[in-house]
Amino acid sequence: MKTLFLSSAGVRFPIVKEELLKILPKPLTKIKLAHIITASKVEDNQTFVDVDQKVLEELGIQVEKIDIADKKERELEYILNAKDVIYVNGGNGFYLLKKVFESGFDKIIKKLIAKGVIYVGVSAGTYIVCPTIEMSDWKKIKDNHYGLTNLEGLNLVPFLISVHYNREKYREKIKEGIAKTNLPVKILTDDQALLIRDGNVQLVGKGDEVKV
């Protein structure tokens, strides 16, 4: 079964953590999880990565923190093949997507998902599985694309996902972006995630689906 769990803000939000725990295939102490922190490496504030790491470790999960930017494809494939869950954290979506393609992570993750490894996305980690990461441009917080000229994502879902809708400073920018795109858009607050199993999409967490 192909399983993606695509969130706005990850396990530091209790309701999202509880929904993720429901789908893990083994007892928590048996779960091996790769915590991909690459998107955060160019951010000034990386505390959210430490918070997620602590939450996951306190659950008893075996967590390995990984930066794909300094890995070659063969090495990365060897490391990730042993994992049950690939947890791709947030940060800068442009930098993350660039390193996804440079490292070969794009090819590896598709193979892993096909064989049943669970993909968990957080913010930028959610963006990259979409047809494009144009959503990263909507908020206009930073204009640095880190040399990335093609915004095409992994195309693992047929729609865009916009996150952090509950944060007032982003809401109007998100609405403006949705009005401009030609693709369907699903919206998440920080208390929500999309659980996608073999193409079936379910909103989980707190609150109803946001419609704009």
Image (cartoon, rainbow, N blue to C red):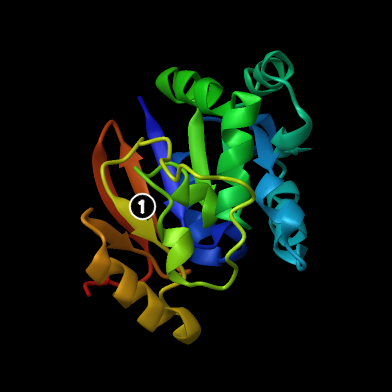
Quadrant location of the C terminus? Answer: bottom left
- In the rendered view, would you say 163 is above or below 87? below
User: Residue 166 in the image: x percent, y percent?
Assistant: 43, 79
Label 1: state its secondary structure. Answer: strand
- In the rendered view, would you say 137 is above or below 116? below
Q: Nearer the viewer, residue 182 or 201?
A: 182
Q: Quadrant of the rendered structure where residue 115 is?
A: top left
Residue at 53% x, 48% y is 125
Q: Along the horizontal axis of the image, is 48 left or right of 9?
A: right
Disc 1 target residue: 194
Residue at 48% x, 69% y is 190
Disc 1 residue type (three-letter)? Leu
User: Residue 12 in the image: x percent, y percent?
Assistant: 62, 63
Q: Quadrant of the rendered structure where residue 5 is?
A: top left
Quadrant location of the N terminus? Answer: top left
Q: Nearer the viewer, residue 32 or 78?
A: 78
